[in-house]
Image: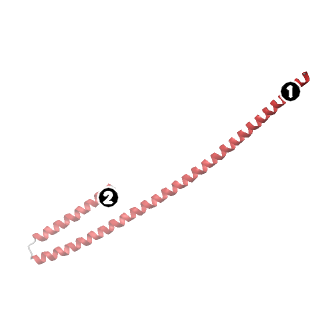
Amino acid sequence: MSNQQSGGEFFAGLVIGGLIGAAIALIMAPQSGEETRAQLMEKSDEWRTVAGESLADSRAKADAIISDARARAENIVVEARTKAEQIQAQAKEQASEIQEKGLSAVSEQSAKIKDVASALASKVKKADTDATAEA
């Protein structure tokens, strides 16, 4: 980017230097004032045309650079959205797996608690029957 700026600065200096040189050459030339003024007008029109063309070229290049930057930015946004959707899908999948494992663990623990409660109830019932039989 700095090379492009340096080129633009060089070109601007070249144009300005050319204008100054042309003006000095015309002023110092041994001719009448009318001829000098006519030449100055002609040269200023030429340089104005050159400057206008240069400005148009610069604008076209700037527009191309801006269009390229926009296209790249849009591609980056699309890629980011795609990655985000992939990450979101993976997170949902992992959450489902964790939820299934959690439900499975709860079911296993519930079954174990029921078995222990049932065994405990049987022992209490047996102890109660034994205590009633002894009495």
Front one among 73 and 23: 73
Residue 79: image x %, image y %? Answer: 52, 55
Q: Residue at x 48, y 56 (%)?
A: 76
Kindly identify the amino acid type of the residue bearing the numbered disc 2.
Answer: Gln
Front one among 114 and 45: 114
How crowded is the residue under tag 1: few (<14 C-alpha within 10 Å), some, or many (20+)? few
Q: Residue furthest top?
A: 134
User: Going by the image, does 17 lie left or right of 108?
Assistant: left
User: Going by the image, does 105 lie left or right of 61?
Assistant: right
Q: Residue furthest front?
A: 135
For marks 1 and 2, give the one nearer the viewer.
1
Q: Residue at x 63, y 46 (%)?
A: 95
User: Going by the image, does 20 lie left or right of 134?
Assistant: left
Element type where label 1 sits in the image: helix
Q: Residue at x 58, y 52 (%)?
A: 86
Question: Which residue was labeled with disc 1?
Answer: 128
User: Going by the image, does 120 lie left or right of 50?
Assistant: right
Residue 98 in the image: above or below residue 85: above
